[in-house]
Image: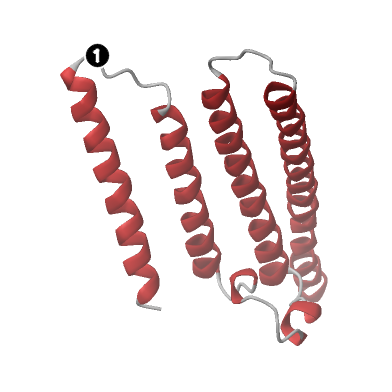
Amino acid sequence: MKGFFEGVLWNSRYVVLLAVWSSIVGMLLLFVLSALDMAALAIEFFKVIFMGLDRPDFHITVVSHVITAVDDFLLATVLLIFALGLYELFISKIAAAHGDEHANNILMINSLDDLKDRLGKVILMILIVAFFKNVLHVTFDDPLNILYMGAGILMVSLASYFSHKAGDKH
C-alpha cells in the first residue's frame, strides 16, 4: 500500500504539464498577437508617411504601440521561462538545452530560487516598461506631477540597480 501511494504521489508531478502547456500556448499567443500588432502599426506608418495622412498624435501612438509590444514580448518571455523552469524542476532536464554549447543559462533552471530570480527580473522589466508607457500620458501642468515623475524615475532606477546588484552576488 505504501509503495502504491508513493508511486501515485510521485507521478502526480505530471500535473505540472498542464501549467507548462498553458504557459507555452499563452507565450505563442502573445508573440503572435504582438507581432501582428507591430505589422499593423508598420502598415499604418507607411500610410501616414507615404500617403500623407494627417495624424498629429501619430508619434505618441507609435511609441505607445511599440512599448505595448515590448511589454507583451516580455510577458511572453516570462511565460517561456516559467514553462521551461517548471518542466526542468518537476519533470526532467531538457537534454537539448544542456547539450547545446550555445544554450543560454537563463533558460536552465536548477531550483525554485533560480526560477523566482529569473522571473522576478523579467517582471521588474515589465513593470519598468509599463511605468514608462504611462509616463507618455502625464501632463506637467502641476508642479506636483513633476515631483511624482521624478520620484517614480528614482524608484524605477533603484529597483533596477538593486536587482542588478543582487544578480552580481551569484
Horizontal side, residue 161 vs residue 1: left or right: left
| Picture quarter with the N terminus | bottom right
Mark 1 neighbour class, 10 Å CA radius: few under 14, some 14 to 19, many 20 or more: few
Q: The residue tagged with tag 1: helix, strand or loop?
A: loop
How many marks can you see?
1
| In the foreground, 131 or 124 | 131
Q: Position of residue 161 (x, y in %)?
A: 31, 59
Horizontal side, residue 49 vs residue 135: left or right: right
Residue pointed to by mark 1: 141
| In the foreground, 71 or 13 | 71
- What amino acid type should be assigned to the residue bearing mark 1? Asp
- Establish if 118 lies above or below 63: below
| Residue drawn where x is 74% and y is 45% of the image | 31
Q: Position of residue 145 (x, y in %)?
A: 24, 22
| In the foreground, 49 or 10 | 49
Horizontal side, residue 163 vs residue 92: left or right: left
| Picture quarter with the C terminus | bottom left
| Residue drawn where x is 18% and y is 21% of the image | 144
Q: Position of residue 59 (x, y in %)?
A: 54, 26
- Establish if 29 lies above or below 82: above
Q: Position of residue 72 (x, y in %)?
A: 63, 41
| Residue drawn where x is 68% and y is 26% of the image | 49
- Establish if 163 lies above or below 76: below
